[in-house]
Image (tube, rainbow, N blue to C red):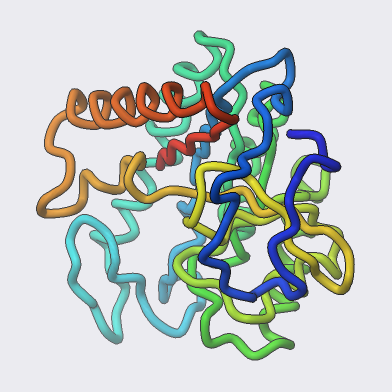
Amino acid sequence: MMQMNRFICIGDTAMERDFNGYRLQPPPATQWPNGARLALSIVVNVEEGGELSLSAGDERNEYVHEVVEEVVGVRDLLMESHFEYGVRRGWPRIRKALSSRGIKASVNAVGRSVETAPWIAQEAVSDGHEIMGHSYRWEAHTAMDEATERQAIVKTIAAIRNATGIAPVGWHTRSSASINTRRLLAENGFLYDSNAYNDDLPYIVSVNEKPFVVVPYAFDTNDLKFTFRYGFSHGEDFYRYCADSFDRLYEESAEGPRMMSVGLHL
């Protein structure tokens, strides 16, 4: 991480909107280790087994995947099979790709996914990757009441700790967080979240009068665009977009450090 004393605190409250950012005073490039100009954040999302499913005792089936169709009242066998692929074939492939290149990633894991396939979290830690919390189920926190959200956070911590012996210090909520999320994370020992998409650098906010780091995520340099009608069609599309983004940010980093986030899914 960058040196904490060189961050800029942008607000008195965790959820205060800020349109100024760093503006004309970006942090100097010496903040990244070894004088690096651009930090690349690779995030591998592990969501399989955490999707809503009647077979898991949930109130309904998940309906957001390649086939957007809600099956009501009975098990959705197509959806269940779809989400199994990432565990059976996707993780081994991504793990090999990262290991062969010496890349360390942040594995953004749903708590119930870790309970379903604990070996993914265990192998990730063994390979030197970080495990983040991605909620207990693969669901938004937007409308959760505080007690329900607190329970989801606690259950996610427990699932990851039980599998790996390590409690997560980073968090990313699917879709939107609630106005309480950041405060609840801080109260449960988290040091940062990625529930923001508003900058090319981490920054600090004040939560309960203490510093809390925000590490922005990105939806454009992200393989989820393969599921969009006007998104990526070929692997080369994803590569070229990420390469162009890298080149642009690296050019800008001559003036001050930058960070680029790349999101992958099993």
Q: Position of residue 30 (x, y in %)?
A: 72, 22
Is 148 drawn above or below residue 154 in the view shown?
below
Q: Quadrant of the N terminus?
A: top right
105 sits left or right of 209 in the view = left
Q: Position of residue 107 (x, y in %)?
A: 59, 40
* Residue found at x 59% / y 36%: 120
8 sits left or right of 64 in the view = right
212 or 52, which is in the foreground? 212
Q: Position of residue 177 (x, y in %)?
A: 56, 72
Q: In which quarter of the view is residue 9 placed?
A: bottom right
* Residue found at x 30% / y 86%: 73
| Count of marks placed on residues | 0
Q: Quadrant of the C terminus?
A: top left
Is 43 drawn above or below residue 173 in the view shown?
above
112 sits left or right of 242 in the view = right
Q: Is residue 124 visible?
A: yes
Q: Position of residue 134 (x, y in %)?
A: 59, 57
* Residue found at x 56% / y 61%: 195
Q: In which quarter of the view is residue 208 placed?
A: bottom right
* Residue found at x 77% / y 50%: 169
Is 141 drawn above or below residue 49 in the view shown?
below
